[in-house]
Image (cartoon, rainbow, N blue to C red):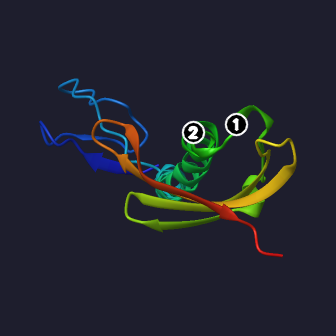
Amino acid sequence: MSLTQCSECLGLLSSKARSCPHCGDVKKSPVSPGFKRLLVYASVVLSLFLIGAVLDYSFFLNRIAFRIAISKYVPAHLKTPRTAQFCNYTDVEIVTEGYSFTVYGWVDAQNLFGAVIRNNFECMLVYDRFNHRWSEVRTDIYPAVH
């Protein structure tokens, strides 16, 4: 135990004392190295989380573009949309340019004669990030080539 000087009255006090016995000034305790280390680790983890959230945002926009394409825009171009069986998300290709998404996939649906035909589709969507709305640029459906 050593003696230190009070920052207010310059009197001597113990290094373990919480306040000055002369003037009553409360001694500020220094931040422990363990707490500083904890703050550094927490800031690194938070930074990695935020970077991951930004990267995952584009992943979610791709999935949303796929869901909107198969639920709203592609069925509007089919002869019998209620019979449509769409490909899975893992079977599609999505090309992204900024907030423009082009979804390439396939759909099995009945034609007017009742035969189930596989068709490929290409649906281009644009996401308006300010109004949080999706809009269709174009949707093309063409027969699958075997």
**Where 18 falls versus 138 (above or below)?**
above
Mark sitting on residue 81: 1
**Nearer the observer, 8 or 11:** 8
What residue is pinned by disc 2? 76
Query: Residue 118, how many percent across, how many down?
Result: 80, 58
Query: Residue 1, how many percent across, how many down?
Result: 47, 49
**Nearer the observer, 16 or 46:** 46
Query: Residue 96, how many percent across, how many down?
Result: 48, 66
Q: Residue furthest front?
A: 113
**Where 101 falls versus 12 (above or below)?**
below
Mark 2 in CB contact with mark 1 (< 8 angstroms)? yes
Label 2 element class: helix
Query: Residue 94, how many percent across, how many down?
Result: 58, 64
How dense is the environment of label 1, judged by Cα within 10 Å: few (below 14), some, or many (20 and up)? some
**Nearer the observer, 87 or 8:** 87
Compared across the picture, whether 58 is left or right of 8 comes to: right
Q: Residue type at mark 1: give it.
A: Pro
Label located before the other in sequence (2 or 1): 2
Give the Cα distance between marks 2 and 1: 7 Å
Q: Residue at x 29, y 49 (%)?
A: 4
Residue 11, image quadrant:
top left
